[in-house]
Image (spheres, rainbow, N blue to C red):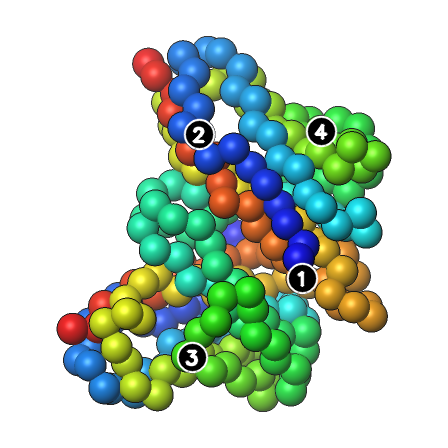
């Protein structure tokens, strides 16, 4: 069973702080890693993708990938109340042959307090 | 902005009725997915497709069925709706690159069976 694990939270941070969200995955063959943001009652929205070890920065967001440790994280700098949402980690895992299946973690609920 | 559309957005229907939830994408994506999500809960994959005439059941058992006759279209059908089918249904698609493409979501269909 291919698994993606996240702490469910809630994670509460004050406005302006750094929020750190973590994710581990079980399939060593995974090659693509994504972070989605989901506001209550809305669809997931892609915010970051990362494919190679190291850091990838996009504005206030930084994704970090360590394939040896099977670990991917998302840092949100200068957190804003509008960042309050559930953050979903997703991994493309090998379903056999050339096909890959997108597997989601359960999500971490982030609350940014003004 | 992703071009993936779901209709209807909201549906209230009586027990025993047959329903079809529509999902279409204009991005030429080969992979399409159906997820089921209850409020505040995790995403559950119920069906996925790697291309035309290819469909697979997901991790969560579902009484629904799907078809993929055209690349752009991935409808989900419930032959006889029950109150236990009440949920949000989310459709997603991802692109041609093996293991390297992001998935985009439609706006979802919120189904209520009374």
Left or right for B98, reference A5: right
- What x and y, as percent, mark residue B40? 34, 45
Residue A101: mark in rendering: 1
Q: Which residue is mark 2?
A: A9
Q: Which residue is mark 3?
A: B64
Query: Of label 2 and label 4, which has the lower sequence position?
Result: 2
Give me the chain letter of mark 1: A
Q: Is residue A57 above or below residue B82?
A: above
Q: Residues within 10 Å of mark 3 (few under 14, many from 20)?
A: some
- What x and y, as percent, mark residue B67? 53, 85
Q: Look at the numbered disc 4 and give the secondary structure of its residue.
A: strand
Q: Residues within 10 Å of mark 2 (few under 14, many from 20)?
A: few
Left or right for B84, reference B102: left
Distance in Å between CA atoms under marks 1 and 4? 21 Å
Distance in Å between CA atoms under marks 2 and 4? 20 Å
**Residues at marks 1 and 2 on the same chain:** yes
Q: Which residue is mark 4?
A: A64
Query: Of label 1 and label 2, which has the lower sequence position?
Result: 2
Give me the chain letter of mark 2: A
């Amino acid at each position: 069973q291919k698994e993606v694990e996240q702490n469910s939270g809630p994670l509460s941070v004050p406005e302006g702080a750094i929020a750190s969200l973590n994710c581990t995955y079980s399939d060593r063959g995974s090659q693509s890693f994504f972070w989605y943001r989901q506001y209550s009652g809305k669809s997931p929205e892609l915010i970051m993708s990362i494919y190679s070890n190291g850091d990838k920065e996009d504005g206030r967001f930084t994704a970090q990938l360590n394939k040896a440790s099977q670990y991917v994280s998302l840092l949100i700098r200068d957190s804003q109340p509008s960042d309050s949402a559930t953050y979903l980690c997703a991994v493309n895992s090998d379903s056999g042959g050339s096909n890959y299946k997108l597997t989601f973690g359960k999500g971490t609920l982030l609350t940014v307090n003004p | 902005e992703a071009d993936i559309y779901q209709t209807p957005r909201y549906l209230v229907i009586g027990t025993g009725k047959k329903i079809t939830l529509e999902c279409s994408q204009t991005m030429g994506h080969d992979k399409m997915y159906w997820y089921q999500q209850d409020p505040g809960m995790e995403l559950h994959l119920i069906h996925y497709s790697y291309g035309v005439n290819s469909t697979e059941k997901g991790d969560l058992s579902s009484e629904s069925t799907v078809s993929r006759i055209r690349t752009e279209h991935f409808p989900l059908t419930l032959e006889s709706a029950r109150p236990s089918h009440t949920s949000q249904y989310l459709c997603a698609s991802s692109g041609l690159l093996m293991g390297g493409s992001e998935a985009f979501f439609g706006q979802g269909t919120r189904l209520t069976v009374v």
